[in-house]
Every structure is written in C-alpha cells, then in structure tokens.
C-alpha cells in the first residue's frame, strides 16, 4: 500500500517516526510530505531514515518535482494520511486552498484522505474546528481520533493524537489493505477495565482498574491485523479505532458478553479486573441510613477466565495476575488452577500497576517465563501480543485455522 503521510506543525509530530515504522511494519510504502512548520518539531533526517525515501516539503522543488511531480504523488497514493493534523490544515482543506505541497496533493488526489487531529483541547472544541470537522466528514474524509487525556500543554481533554499503532491499524482497516500483521485472519477477544457490582441504584462496589492495559492490548492486536472484540467495563478511555467495543458494567454482564464474543475466537486475553464478589441482592431502592451499622452479604461472581479456559473448544487463553507480593508464585498457581495457556503477572500497589501509563510484567507458561521491564503500556502490550502469538502458534501449530482470542488483564 502506498501512503502519502502528511506531517503538520504540532508537538505530536515527535511521534511521526514511530508512526512511519508502524505503517512500514505492515508492508506500506510511506512517502512523507512535511509542512514548513512541521520541520520545527521533527527533523527530516530522522523521517528520511525511517521511511527510506527522501522527504518532500516544497511545492517548488524542481529536482523533486522532476522525479515525481505533486500530481504523480497524488495518483501514487492509495491513501493520504495527515498525522498530526493541526486545526490550520483542517481549515485549509475545508477551504480548498492549496498554498503548499501537502494541501495541493489533497486537492489533486482521488485516494481516500484521513486526518489524525492533534491540538490543544480548547482549539479542538472551538466551534470553528468542530464545523470544519463536520464538513470534512460530510465530504468523506476520515477523522481518526483525537484521543482524550493529558496534553503537552499541561492541560487535559480531547485533542491528543492517537497512538501510532492505533492510527496505523485504522488506516489499514479503512483501505481494506491487508498488511503483514502477525494476527491477520485471527480473532481475539480482550476484556478490560473494572466491573461495577450494584449495592443499590446509586451505589456499587468497584476497583482501581483504569482499563489502560487491556485497551493497549486490544489496540496492539488490532494493529497486528486481528479482528478484535474488546469487552470493556466502565472506563474513562476513548474507544480505540479499528476494533469492536462491547460495553458492560457488572461481572455477570461481562461473562455473558465474553461468552457471546468468544465463539470462533483464537485467543482470549482476560485483562479485566473482574469483581470476585458482588452483593447478593442489590436493593431496588436507595438504601437509607437508618441503622448505626449495616452488613452486606457478598456472593462469588462467575470466573470468566476460568470458564473460557474450561470450554471444550477453548481459545488460547491468557490471564492476568495482579499481586502485591509473591508475584510469580501466586501467578503460577493461577496458571495451573485455571488451566491457562499463559499468565501475565504484575505487581500492583500505591506506585505501580493501576491507573498508570507504564507497567512491567513477568509472563509465565507451563514450561517457561519471560520478564518485561518497565515500559509504556502501549510498548508492553505490543511485546505481550507478540509473545502470545508465538506461544499460540507453538501450541496450536502454524497450520491452525484462524481462530484467536486473548484474555483480559488487571491493570
Ligand atoms: N478473572 C475473571 N473473572 C473473575 C475474576 C478474575 O475473568 N471473576 C480474571 C481476570 O481478568 C484475570 C485473572 O482472572 O485475568 C485474575 O485472576 P484472579 O484469581 O481473579 O485474581 P485475583 O482476583 O487477584 O485473585 P486472588 O484475589 O485470589 O488473588
């Protein structure tokens, strides 16, 4: 697949070399076209090294135009992806202006165009930007993201450029392009996030899981070409592009949604922090504070992971173990007791594990283990998916029919 990757002047341009690598990993040819302001944030030297092609930036570069004119570039592209896309370039495309090489290509191409916006959240929410977004979408231009979260300016809100892996996966989905992902043709189910167990209509029992690890795993699997169903408890995360999300609240709902999704799955990854117990009877009306003390009777929730591993046609099943002590020992116990193919063990506590952007892990299987040092959850997720895929293929043989599910983990 031939991709013209437009890079415009936003701080998220520092992620561009990574995005180029993710696109090339899937077999794409990437021709970078930078705007003048993008050069303030990322060097052409780095981008040329990762793309393996000379960078284009100037509409009036006679030598480059002689080699491949802007019209030829516009025809060469199977898709034009602009990431990061500033508010300014969105406005310019809406207006039909073509003062530079990138916007000229946008006017001259018949290929699909996708933009991954990245800007301060107030700029993104500004009515002018939102009106431009609507016009672009009406014209069939794909808007990928943005994500919600902390921003380079120190503020929080919608406007972050999505993770390069997620953008790459979406681009391949948009074009129907088959890359060289490890999980092409495989189906994977991931559970993520906490569950909520109702006490009464306004109160519930939950835990500190943010869902970040499970979401990162689902994105990493989609980026490798898998057909992913993400069964998610209540989290405060944007829906990752390029996969199907089924939202649930309670452990029982997650159990039902997982068993519906698991049919034909090749790998199941159980990253959710599912409640072990729930109130026996949720009160139908709000409980009043009439008594000095009160007791709640808790009953066991179904163990989703163990139930999937026990299926006759169980997928390759990956569990998570969040422990505060004796991490590897307790995790190996769970691997055996629940009859899992693999378990990802990590330490949780006040300063590690939950609601953070980084994590470390030890992965255990029946006759081996591998340590992963602290890294971003996105990076760790990529490594875990690679390892799970290797173990899955080793366990089932490379000639298995595509059928992959992944287990959820506590994060
Ligand atoms: N899990 C599940 N359903 C449950 C409970 C847990 O699917 N009702 C899954 C989690 O997604 C995770 C793994 O099981 O993959 C965690 O195992 P578990 O034994 O539940 O861990 P803990 O709850 O930490 O167990 P314990 O409190 O006994 O340490």
Image: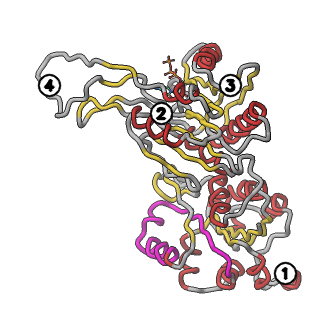
Q: Magenta region: which residues?
A: 110-137
Position of the N terminus, as image quadrant, is: bottom right
**Which residue is found at the position 49% from the left and 53% from the top?**
148
Rounded to the nearest angstrom, the CA distance separating label 4 from label 1 is 76 Å
Q: Specify few, some or many for label 3: CA neighbours under 10 Å numbering under 14, 14-19, or 20 or more.
A: some
Direction from residue 268 to residue 369 in the image, left or right = right
Q: Which mark is residue 289?
A: 4
**Which residue is found at the position 64% from the left and 64% from the top?**
83
Rounded to the nearest angstrom, the CA distance separating label 2 from label 1 is 51 Å
- Image height of 336 relative to 186, above or below: above
**Which residue is found at the position 73% from the left and 59% from the top?**
178
Q: Which mark is residue 209?
A: 2
Quadrant of the rendered image containing residue 112: bottom right
Quadrant of the rendered image containing residue 116: bottom right
Rounded to the nearest angstrom, the CA distance separating label 4 from label 2 is 29 Å
Residue 39 colored in magenta in the image: no
Q: Which mark is residue 362?
A: 3
Circle 1: element type: loop
Rounded to the nearest angstrom, the CA distance separating label 3 from label 4 is 45 Å
> Where's residue 380, x and y in %?
67, 37
Which of the pair 215/191 is nearer the observer? Answer: 191
Q: Specify few, some or many for label 4: CA neighbours under 10 Å numbering under 14, 14-19, or 20 or more.
A: few
Which numbered disc flags the more N-terminal residue, 2 or 1? Answer: 1
Q: Is mark 1 within 8 Å of ligand 1?
A: no
- Identify the image's colour scheme: rainbow, by chain, secondary structure or one colour: secondary structure
Q: Specify few, some or many for label 1: CA neighbours under 10 Å numbering under 14, 14-19, or 20 or more.
A: few
Circle 3: element type: strand
Which of the pair 8/242 is nearer the observer? Answer: 242
Circle 2: element type: loop
Which numbered disc flags the more N-terminal residue, 4 or 1? Answer: 1
Q: Is mark 3 within 8 Å of ligand 1?
A: no
């Amino acid at each position: 697949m031939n991709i013209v990757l437009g890079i415009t002047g936003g701080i998220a341009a520092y992620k561009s070399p990574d995005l180029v690598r993710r696109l090339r990993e899937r077999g794409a040819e990437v021709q970078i076209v930078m705007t003048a302001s993008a050069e303030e944030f990322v060097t052409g030297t780095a981008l040329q090294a990762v793309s393996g092609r000379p960078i284009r930036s100037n509409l009036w570069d006679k030598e480059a135009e002689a080699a491949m004119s802007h019209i030829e570039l516009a025809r060469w592209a199977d898709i034009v992806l602009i990431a990061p896309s500033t508010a300014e370039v969105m406005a310019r495309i809406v207006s039909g202006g073509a003062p530079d090489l990138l916007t000229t290509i946008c006017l001259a191409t018949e290929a699909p165009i996708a933009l991954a916006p990245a800007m301060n959240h107030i700029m993104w929410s500004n009515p002018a930007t939102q009106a431009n977004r609507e016009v672009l979408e009406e014209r069939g231009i794909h808007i990928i993201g943005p994500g919600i979260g902390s921003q380079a300016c120190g503020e929080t809100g919608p406007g972050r450029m999505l993770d390069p892996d997620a953008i790459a996966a979406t681009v391949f989905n948009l074009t129907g392009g088959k890359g060289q992902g490890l999980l092409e043709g495989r189906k994977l189910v991931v559970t993520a996030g906490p569950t909520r167990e109702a006490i009464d209509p306004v109160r519930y029992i939950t835990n500190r899981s943010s869902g970040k690890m499970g979401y990162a795993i689902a994105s990493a699997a989609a980026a490798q070409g898998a057909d992913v169903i993400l069964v998610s408890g209540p989290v405060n995360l944007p829906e990752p592009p390029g996969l199907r999300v089924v939202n649930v609240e309670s452990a029982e709902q997650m159990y039902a949604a997982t068993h519906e999704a698991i049919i034909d799955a090749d790998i199941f990854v159980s990253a959710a922090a599912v409640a072990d117990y729930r109130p026996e009877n949720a009160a139908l009306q709000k409980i009043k504070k009439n008594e000095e003390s009160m007791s709640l009777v808790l009953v066991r929730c179904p163990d989703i992971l163990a139930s999937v591993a026990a299926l006759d046609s169980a997928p390759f099943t990956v569990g998570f173990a969040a422990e505060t002590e004796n991490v590897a020992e307790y995790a190996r116990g769970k691997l055996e007791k629940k009859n899992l193919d693999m378990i990802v063990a990590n330490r949780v506590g006040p300063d590690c594990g939950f609601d953070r952007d980084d994590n470390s892990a030890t992965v255990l299987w029946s006759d081996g283990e591998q340590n992963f040092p602290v890294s971003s959850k996105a990076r760790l997720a990529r490594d875990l998916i690679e390892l799970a895929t290797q173990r899955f293929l080793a366990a089932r043989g490379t000639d298995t029919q595509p059928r992959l599910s992944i287990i959820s983990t506590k994060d």
